Amino acid sequence: MDEPNKRTDGRQPVLKAAKVRFNQSVVDCLVLDLSPGGMRVSTEGFVAFPETVQVELRTGGLWRAERRWQRGLETGFALVAFAGLSGEAAAAASRLYDAVRNDGLREVTARLAAERYYDHPDLPRLCQAATAAVHALEEALRVASGRS
């Protein structure tokens, strides 16, 4: 199944261990290049991948992926959706979630607000940006760790 190059994002060369999961099978592979929308993997032997698989990067990220092309030992997958984290990566994200929630940044920004930011011209904007970033980080870690 050959397709012309339709990718819109540039690929970055990488060498990352991964596993491709489908049906009851798990195939070890090496990610050769990666972009926000896809990846090219290589396997030790030929594998007839189905159209839809799950790719687990060694770092713990799980992706629902669709096979776009296959040539010999190499296969191109489109990354359809982030499916979460596996194993230790989910546990680590959970620990980071707790750390972000308990690190005291909220207390610092609340104190600064109570003191009217000491009339510093940049502190209100910086505190708002920090608070928004922490909320976004908390939400991403909560979802990644599987907490509801």
Image: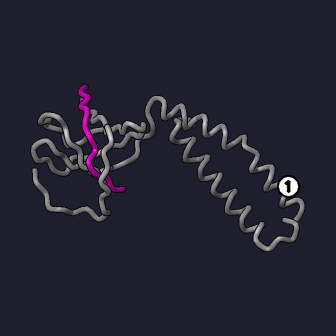
- Quarter of the rendering occupied by the C terminus: top right
The answer to whether residue 112 is above or below residue 28 is: below
Q: Position of residue 60 (x, y in %)?
A: 42, 37
| Nearer the observer, 66 or 109 | 109
Q: Position of residue 104 (x, y in %)?
A: 76, 46
Q: Is residue 75 left or right of residue 38?
A: left
Q: What's the residue at 67%, 39% (across, down)? A: 99
Q: What's the residue at 21%, 47% (across, down)? A: 67
Q: Is residue 130 left or right of residue 42?
A: right
Q: Is residue 92 left or right of residue 44?
A: right
| The furthest residue to the bottom | 121
Q: Position of residue 101 (x, y in %)?
A: 69, 42
The answer to whether residue 18 is above or below residue 3 is: above
Q: Amino acid at mark 1?
A: Arg
32 in magenta: yes
User: Which residue does the numbered mark 1 point to in the structure image?
Assistant: 111
Region of the chain picked out in magenta, as a range: 22-36
Q: Is residue 85 left or right of residue 30?
A: right
The answer to whether residue 146 is above or below residue 106 is: above
138 in magenta: no
Give the dominant element type of the magenta stretch: helix, strand or loop: strand
Q: What's the residue at 58%, 35% (across, down)? A: 94
Q: Position of residue 73 (x, y in %)?
A: 13, 41
- Number of numbered callouts drawn: 1
Q: What's the residue at 26%, 40% (across, down)? A: 30
